[in-house]
Amino acid sequence: MLTLAAALLLSPVSTPVELASTPAPLHGTLLTPEDQTRAAAVIIAGSGPTDRDGNSPIGVTGGVYRQLAEGLAERGIATVRYDKRGIAASTAAATDEASLTFDTYIDDAKAWAALTAEKTGAPCVWLVGHSEGALIAQAAADNPGVCGLVLLSPVGVRANVELRRQIEPKLPPSVKPEVDHIMSELEAGRTVSDTPPYLAALFRPSVQPYLISYFVVDPQALIAAYDRPVLLGHGSTDIQVKPENSEPLLAAQPKAERVVFEGLNHVLRQAPLDPAGNAATYGDASIPLGAEVAPAVADFILKPR
């Protein structure tokens, strides 16, 4: 049996890392394997105020990204995961909301990939993106320093199409024409100045430049043009971004590989299909990352090519 001291010596090494940025640095964690590093990856968070560990103050706990990084480290893969601009330890790096665009997150991901290669000595790094982070990963992957992509819970259509799908069933009939008008204007690249207060959470004027830049990014076009390895991973009980989203991506890039994690939801935890039970798992820190996720990601990254 290992002594406590020996066990500690065998643990992956966690090191704070800082990325120079304006108006303030971005912060993350480099987790390196206990033994030889066989590959390196950057874990890119999903939408909203999601931190480097996969937690969010609006109801997600338990650290699924941290668990993914630990699972990859056990298999010889070093990772950097980071707090997005304006989130957690990177709060001071927030820009004015009106000047934030989707390109800002793409540029940050590219910079983190370069820093990860520098810190690990890897000739190239993998981008592992979750949900919105999968689209960021796709858009950031067009450079020789990226080995390939792992897209977890990816959206298979443009963000405006998915947003319409998610919000329209929840809208009162009296509001639908107004939302359709605002969405149509944003899709055409035009801002809308007279958004009502009750739609401010989604469409306030200061967030519209971000939405316009987000809506034009086409995941199918990106994956069709991408010639390096791609893994699409989706949970079978994901009711937020349904697993069918992987299908148009696979159709656009038949060389991609796809894995469906049976019984896992959008945050890659065991969950039922019923909405209430599924949503309850997001904030239940006792439910771990699905046991098959890290092995599937590691096997794909380390596959001989």
Image: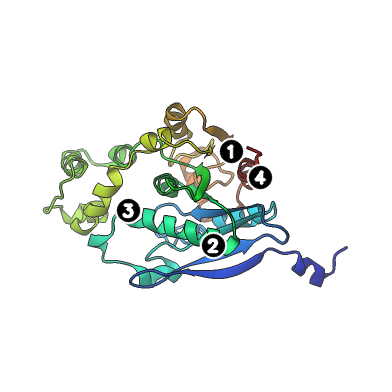
**Residue 228 image position (x, y, % from top left):** 51, 38
Query: Which mark is drawn over residue 20?
Result: none
**Residue 41 image position (x, y, % from top left):** 56, 53
Q: Nearer the viewer, residue 166 or 74?
A: 74
Q: Amino acid under label 4? A: Pro
**What residue is rendered at 73% in x and 60% in y?**
35
Q: Which residue is mark 3?
A: 103
**Residue 175 visible in the snapshot:** yes
The kind of secondary structure element at disc 4 is helix
Locate residue 65 relative to residue 104 in the image: left or right.
Answer: right
In 3D space, how far apart are the residues under numbered discs 3 and 2 (Cα atoms)? Answer: 23 Å
Q: Amino acid under label 2? A: Glu
The kind of secondary structure element at disc 3 is helix
Do the residues under discs 4 and 2 have CB atoms within 8 angstroms? no
Q: Which residue is mark 1?
A: 263
> If you read the primary sequence from the N terminus, does the residue marked by circle 4 or circle 2 appear first?
2
In 3D space, how far apart are the residues under numbered discs 2 and 1 (Cα atoms)? Answer: 38 Å
Q: How many C-alpha atoms fall within 10 Å of the one at disc 1: few (<14), some, or many (≥20)?
A: some
> If you read the primary sequence from the N terminus, does the residue marked by circle 1 or circle 4 appear first?
1
Q: Amino acid under label 3? A: Asp
Do the residues under discs 2 and 1 have CB atoms within 8 angstroms? no
Q: How many C-alpha atoms fall within 10 Å of the one at disc 2: few (<14), some, or many (≥20)?
A: few
Q: Which residue is mark 2?
A: 118
The kind of secondary structure element at disc 2 is helix
**Residue 235 image position (x, y, % from top left):** 54, 39
> If you read the primary sequence from the N terminus, does the residue marked by circle 3 or circle 2 appear first?
3
Depth check, mark 1 against mark 4: the one in front is 4
Q: Amino acid under label 1? A: Gly
